[in-house]
């Protein structure tokens, strides 16, 4: 796997890897908060569900009867429910393009804090992306191995963001059953030098049922661009200044489009987007992601529509208390 990522080619993207059945998941046999025995039922859909109160605090004292699940508007019987965490496979997807050179050490520190706060049973892999997409560390729970992998990170030039999302979903998480997630630090702007479109990357995330937690650099970069714009607009540099002003305005527009795309990815996959105003906030952000993964409910249900026709099924989860906010993915492809 390491070598596959070090030499990613169009051939790799064209392999046509079969998507594992969308409903095939691991589930606890007991309806309780205990992790206990794990069994596989290929007819079930797994939903990681986060519940927050009006203050944004996690609510972790609900029971199965407090939840209602709907698929395409039709109520679904909950077949299993757990609060205590099932192990999770997490891909740390790391933008190492030239735009993060100065902040790479801040990221390493925040990523290490996140890893340190995971449960020992969780597994992590590290994937970097710039001119290429590279698997830096395959699945492991070893803290020393992950620390060494973080220390090996360097930077490149361009940003193959869509390739990275696609490969993380298909190659790293496509064969994983149970809970999984991607956490990515990026501005979301693809350089257009890869082989995967934004739509294809997004679909791969939905098909593989991967929640994406986005730590977006769009606000940080936007502030820097606006400060530079103010400087040039006050200067008297003639044609050169106007050219630079136009370029900055174009960059700001691109950041705005990217932020909307990243928000869509996070919302529709059941993850979350974070928009820090400075890299000083990274530690706090990564801590919040670790806290959420520890505080999720896991709901399983067997769809009343048993056909596997590849169609998209919209999913909605409600709780009996209308004052609570529920987050899960928008749906899945039945395969």
Image (spheres, helix red, strand yellow):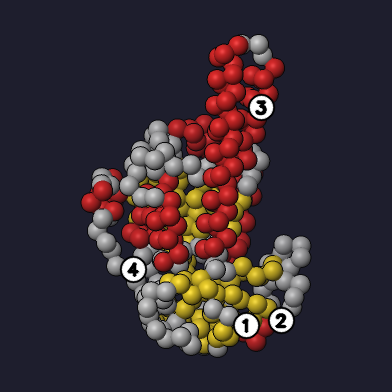
Residue 160: assigned label = none
User: Could you say which is closer to the camera, residue 45 or residue 63?
Assistant: 45
Any part of residue 12 in sight: yes
- Local crowd size for mark 2, using a 10 Å CA cut-off: few (<14), some (14–19), many (≥20): few
Q: Which mark is residue 227?
A: 3
Determine the image quadrant of residue 309. Answer: bottom left
Question: Residue 138 sits in which quadrant?
Answer: bottom left
Which residue corresponds to mark 1? 68
Q: Choose between 129 and 160: the one closer to the eye.
A: 160
- Closer to the chain start, of discs 1 and 4, is 4
Of the image marks 2 and 3, the number of the one nearer the N terminus: 3
Question: How far apart, in angstroms, are the residues tagged by discs 1 and 4?
Answer: 28 Å
Q: Nearer the viewer, residue 50 or 139?
A: 50
Q: Secondary structure at mark 4?
A: loop
Number of numbered discs present? 4
Residue 210: image location, x then y, percent: 46, 64
What quarter of the picture does the N terminus occupy? bottom left
Q: Which residue is mark 4?
A: 19
How many residues crowd around disc 4 within 10 Å: few (fewer than 14), some, or many (20 or more)?
Answer: few
- Mark 1 to mark 2 CA distance (whole Å): 8 Å
The residue wearing badge 2 is: 320
**Left or right of 2: which side holds 140?**
right
Q: CA distance from mark 4 to mark 2?
A: 35 Å
Residue displayed at 58% across by 53% down: 263
């Amino acid at each position: 796997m390491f070598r596959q990522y070090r030499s990613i080619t169009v051939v790799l993207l064209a392999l046509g890897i079969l998507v594992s059945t969308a409903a095939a998941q691991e589930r606890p046999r007991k309806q309780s908060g205990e992790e206990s025995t794990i069994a596989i039922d290929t007819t079930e859909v797994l939903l990681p569900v986060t519940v927050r109160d009006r203050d944004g605090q996690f609510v972790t004292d609900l029971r199965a009867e407090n939840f209602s699940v709907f698929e395409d508007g039709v109520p679904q019987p909950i077949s299993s429910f757990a609060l205590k965490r099932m192990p999770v496979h997490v891909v740390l997807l790391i933008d190492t393009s030239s735009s993060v050179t100065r902040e790479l050490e801040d990221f390493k520190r925040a990523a290490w804090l996140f890893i340190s706060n995971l449960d020992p049973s969780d597994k992590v892999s590290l994937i970097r992306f710039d001119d290429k997409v590279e698997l830096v560390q395959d699945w492991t729970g070893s803290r020393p191995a992950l620390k060494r992998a973080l220390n090996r990170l360097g930077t490149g030039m361009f940003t193959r963001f869509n390739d990275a999302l696609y490969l993380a979903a298909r190659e790293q998480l496509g064969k994983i059953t149970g809970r999984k997630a991607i956490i990515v630090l990026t501005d979301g702007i693809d350089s257009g030098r890869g082989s995967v479109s934004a739509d294809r990357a997004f679909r791969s995330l939905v098909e593989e049922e991967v929640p994406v937690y986005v730590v977006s650099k769009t606000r940080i970069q936007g502030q820097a661009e606006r400060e530079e714009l103010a400087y040039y607009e006050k200067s008297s540099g003639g044609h050169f200044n106007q050219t630079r002003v136009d370029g900055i305005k174009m960059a700001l527009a691109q950041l705005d489009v990217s932020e909307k795309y990243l928000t869509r990815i996070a919302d529709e996959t059941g993850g979350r987007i974070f928009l820090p105003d400075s890299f000083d906030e990274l530690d706090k952000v990564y801590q919040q992601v670790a806290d959420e993964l520890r505080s999720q409910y896991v709901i399983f249900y067997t769809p009343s529509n048993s056909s596997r026709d590849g169609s998209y099924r919209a999913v909605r989860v409600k709780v009996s208390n209308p004052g609570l906010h529920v987050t899960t993915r928008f749906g899945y492809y039945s395969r």
